[in-house]
Image (tube, rainbow, N blue to C red):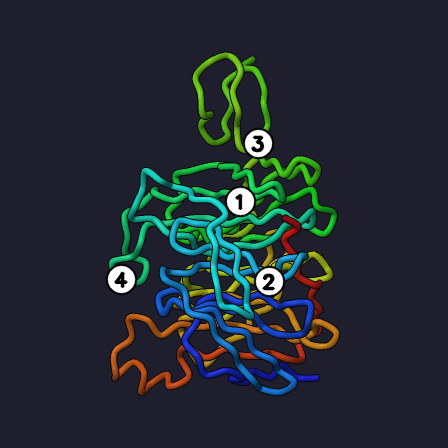
Amino acid sequence: MSVKVECVVKERCEIGEEEKEGTLLFVDISGQKIHRWNPATNQKETVATEKFVGCAVPRRSGGYVIGEGRSFGALDWESKSISTIAVIDEDKPNNRFNDGKVDPAGRLFAGTMAIEERPTVLELKQGSLFSLNKDHIVVKHFNQVDISNGLDWSLDHKTFYYIDSLTYTVEAFNYDINTGSISETHTHTHTHTHKPCTTSTAVCVCVGNRRMVYKMDEGEGIPDGMCIDADGRLWVACYSGGRVIQIDPQTGVRLQTVKLPVDKTTSCCFGGRDYSDLYVTSACKGMDEADMAKQPQAGCVFRITGLGAKGIPANSFTG
């Protein structure tokens, strides 16, 4: 079966998640909308938000949890009401949530960034990575992030994969699924070479074995959203690269490239009856009329079939 790329939803958006009910949930960050699309009926429903919305994930008890502005919020789809769960980055009013995803234990991880002046132009090192636990306690894992983006977990749940877009890399961390921790506590017995510790005392907390999995090649664009397939390979949407790439995180080798008819590919997730369809979102923010004339499908959601890969169902937030 050959690879096929088709536009299935003509709607400006940024990042997608596939729900267990067989509908595609995706957000338009700057348009401040959350969309839910049913591929079987081609029907789309929309809920408006008051602030930039970076992510939306299904909640096991019903409804959704979203990252809106600098808040984690609970969304009741039927009433279209949003209630605040927790506020983060209170000392950084110009920040907002970006990409987020639920880990296999039901915690929501989501990162922040400064609000952009224009695409990829922003105050650097303002973002952090947070998680929201089922008891609604927020944990801050690390800071000094430019654009917090794609994230996912290895199939054995022992590795956390992460993208800070302007590093042009995919990184990996040791992960403890029982605690939701990507940090390790140790004492200084020698000069260590990993990222700087958060304290200069004898006992310190360091980000767990942070390491590079893949460095973007010239012309591939900026790494954005990401998902994992059933074989443990990562799929990365390449902003300004007009493609998604499949990489083997064990070897750092790019295995496959699929080009799309738009430059600003933003995120990807698997869906469909057997999770063999890859849905890819795109953006058109910052494009003028001439750009749109060259890429009239910018902002569409695309479906890629025939990849020979399958995804796994998305996790739901448990709190």
**Count of numbered circles on the image:** 4
Dot 4 amino acid type = Arg
* Residue designated by label 2: 63
Q: Which mark is nearer the camera, 1 or 3?
A: 3
* Residue designated by label 4: 118
Look at the numbered discs 4 and 3 and tell me whether their residues touch, using CB distance below 8 Å.
no
Which comes before the other along the chain, label 4 or label 2?
2
What is the x, y in percent for residue 78?
56, 70
What is the x, y in percent for residue 265?
45, 70
307 relative position to 214: left or right: right
x 37%, y 83%: residue: 295
Q: Which mark is nearer the camera, 1 or 4?
A: 4
Query: CA separation, marks 1 and 4?
Result: 28 Å
What is the x, y in percent for residue 28?
42, 69
Query: CA separation, marks 2 and 1?
Result: 36 Å
* Residue designated by label 1: 212
Which comes before the other along the chain, label 2 or label 1?
2
Judged from the image, the secondary structure of the residue bearing numbered disc 1 is strand
Judged from the image, the secondary structure of the residue bearing numbered disc 3 is strand
Q: Residues within 10 Å of mark 3 (few under 14, many from 20)?
A: some
* Residue designated by label 3: 183
